[in-house]
Image: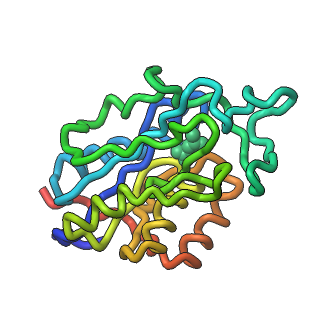
Amino acid sequence: MRYPISQRAALIVVDVQPDFMPGGSLACHEGDAIVPGIRRLLDSRAFRHVVATQDWHPRGHVSFASSHPGRAPFQRIPLYGHAQTLWPEHCVQDTPGAALHPAIDWARLDKVVRKGCDPRVDSYSGFRENFGPNGTRPSTELADWLRSRGVDEVYVCGLARDVCVLWTAQDAAALGFKSRVLWDLTRPVTPESDLASRTKFDQMGVDVVETLPIAA
Ligand code: VGL
Ligand code: ZN
């Protein structure tokens, strides 16, 4: 990454929420390590456009293992013709674990995209829902919002590197944005599959880059 960042670039901060921090109900490995760097990046105003996604599930959400009797977290089940990983209950609407992380000054945001709000459908990407009863429904809201501001490049950071960051960066690339992931400002929920996600970023045309320290 290089400064100054293009005015046509947006930073997308994915799911930096207490439930994904160590001690949270769906903790990412070293999830808290990215918080100071993201805070500095926002405070520096290096990006003209900043968007956050917020995982925001109703109670009893279909992605929770507890919604499927006899199932345990991290098992996979077929759902609407695709594999769905079952998760511990996390980011339940209006609970503290679902808030945007309190250590970051979110007043710097231009937009928050809440996702996973439909009780029947999961949503990993900030651009669309996962597969539901009617297939995948590209909610074009975020892409349109970005394009209407002249944005054609995105930098994605946040959690989890192997799930929501991956899907968001891949969709950005598929939708025609120049897509980059700020590797050092992401952490995985399942470190064992993390090497595979590196390959997936490459295959989907997502550049993997490191954040540069911000000049004082
Ligand atoms: C996420 C699993 C379930 C994420 C969200 O933010 O990566 N992972 N819900
Ligand atoms: Zn979720």
Task: State which quarter of the image contains the N terminus.
Answer: bottom left
Q: Quadrant of residue 29?
A: top right
Counting labels gives: 0
Q: Quadrant of ligand 1?
A: top right
Tell me if 198 is positioned left or right of 76 in this view: left
* Residue at image coords 72%, 46%: 85
Residue at the right extreme of this rendering? 70
Vertical arrangement, residue 189 with respect to residue 138, above or below: above
Hey, which residue is sitting farthest left in the picture?
216
Left or right of residue 9, residue 203 in this image: right
Position of residue 122 relative to residue 199, above or below, is above
Tell me what residue is drawn at x 61 percent, y 64 percent: 197
Res. 153 image quadrant? bottom left
Residue found 44% across the figure and 35% down from its top: 17
Find residue 190 and report its horizontal and vertical position in percent: 66, 49
Q: Give the x, y percent position of residue 12.
A: 35, 55
Rendered position, 67 above or below 142: above
Viewer-closest of 85 and 212: 85
> Which residue is pictured at 77% across the width and 56% down the height?
81
In what quadrant of the picture does the C terminus appear? Answer: bottom left
